[in-house]
Image: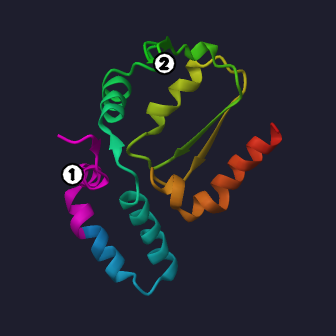
Amino acid sequence: MFDAVPTPLLEVGLACRKPVEYTVTAPLRLWDRLDDPAFVEQQGRKLEWVEGGPDIPVRLYREFVGDLLLENRLIENELELGGRRIELSAIDAPTLLVLGEDDKFVPREASVPILEEIGSEEAEIVELPTGHVGLSVADVAHDRGWPRVADWFAERG
């Protein structure tokens, strides 16, 4: 067995969600738009993000999938970290949630409920017209998203 989940294996798992899109449609879309430097750069950023990640330690992967995705232990106030139970209501720091309108991995309905559980009086959402990977690499993230996040932190100096 693996000590870590290799990035290529994670990539295969993601490709299984939409195999035709991943193996046929996306490459054809790129081929059709090779004369569009902005589109090619955007696709290159996405590919580098997907393929360039580190291997994930198996224990971390199992705990993430089991505790957070399958059992929803964080929102149920049952998740422990370092032997201590995380109490969301005890989080009183200003909180910024950054999400993508087209995120299929962490959709709005899966992320916004945490804001109702935390104790912070100041919670804000930055929502961008992009998907999960796009939150890191899309032009809209670089042009509008990350500057807004930086401003949010600067305002709290």
Residue designated by label 2: 82
Q: Residue at x 59, y 61 (%)?
A: 140
Q: Which residues are magenta?
A: 1-24
From the top left corner, tell me how far across and down residue 123 is, in percent.
Answer: 67, 29
Indicate whether 66 appears above or below 52: above
**Front position in the image: 60 or 111:** 60
Report helix, strand or loop for mark 2: loop
Q: Quadrant of residue 71?
A: top left
The residue carrying pointer 1 sits among few (fewer than 14), some (14 to 19) or many (20 or more) residues within 10 Å by Cα, namely: few
From the top left corner, tell me how far across and down residue 37 is, in percent.
Answer: 50, 82
Mark-to-mark CA distance, 1 and 2: 34 Å
Residue designated by label 1: 16
**Front position in the image: 97 or 80:** 80
Indicate whether 84 appears above or below 144: above
Q: Main secondary structure of the magenta part?
A: helix
Q: Residue at x 71, y 29 (%)?
A: 94
> Magenta segment: does it hold 3?
yes
Where the N terminus falls, by quadrant?
A: top left
